[in-house]
């Protein structure tokens, strides 16, 4: 199925879908990295304030969990695309 009539050039629909998924995946990875670095910065500059240390720690943990979700979703998506498109 060619989507050339819809001004996407000569790309096929699976290729467009893969490009969109990769863009979203990379954006999510960059967001996780930014949140992790923000949490590390908050943790470092907390100056002994336990609430700030806790906030930084929870931000870093949340970013790692988010990254694990992104990687897991990519693995699931690759498996599905393998079985659908071969």
Image (cartoon, grey):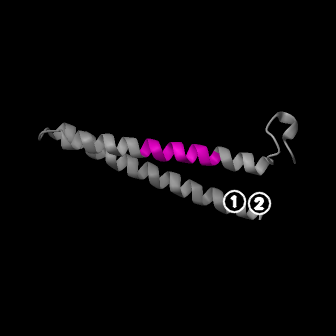
Determine crowd level at label 2: few under 14, some 14-19, many 20+ residues with C-alpha closer than 10 A. Answer: few
Q: Which residue is mark 2?
A: 84
- The Cα–Cα distance between marks 2 and 1, rounded to whole angstroms, is 6 Å
Residue at the image point whose x is 81% and y is 48% from the top: 12
Instruction: Tell me where residue 33 appears, x and y as whole percent.
Output: 40, 46
34 left or right of 69? left
Judged by its main secondary structure, the magenta piece is helix
Residue at the image point whose x is 66% and y is 62% from the top: 79
In front of the other: 28 or 15: 15
Determine crowd level at label 1: few under 14, some 14-19, many 20+ residues with C-alpha closer than 10 A. Answer: few
65 left or right of 11? left
Location of residue 58 with respect to 7 vertically, above or below: below
User: On the image, which quarter does residue 20 sit in?
Assistant: top right
What is the number of the mark on residue 80? 1
Residue at the far top: name it: 7
51 left or right of 20? left
**In the rendered structure, does residue 26 fall within the stretch colored magenta?**
yes
Instruction: Tell me where residue 34 appears, x and y as whole percent.
Output: 39, 41
Residue at the image point whose x is 86% and y is 45% from the top: 2
In front of the other: 86 or 69: 86
Residues in magenta, as a range: 21-32
Would you say the residues marked 2 and 1 are in contact, meaning their CB atoms lie under 8 Å apart? yes
Q: Quadrant of the C terminus?
A: bottom right
User: On the image, which quarter does residue 16 sit in?
Assistant: top right
């Amino acid at each position: 199925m060619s989507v050339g009539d819809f001004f996407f050039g000569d790309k096929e629909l699976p290729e467009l879908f893969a490009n969109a998924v990769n863009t979203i995946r990379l954006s999510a990875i960059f967001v996780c990295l930014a949140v992790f670095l923000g949490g590390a910065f908050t943790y470092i500059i907390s100056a002994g304030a336990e609430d700030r240390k806790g906030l930084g720690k929870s931000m870093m943990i949340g970013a790692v969990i988010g990254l694990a979700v992104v990687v897991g979703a990519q693995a699931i998506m690759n498996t599905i695309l393998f079985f659908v498109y071969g």
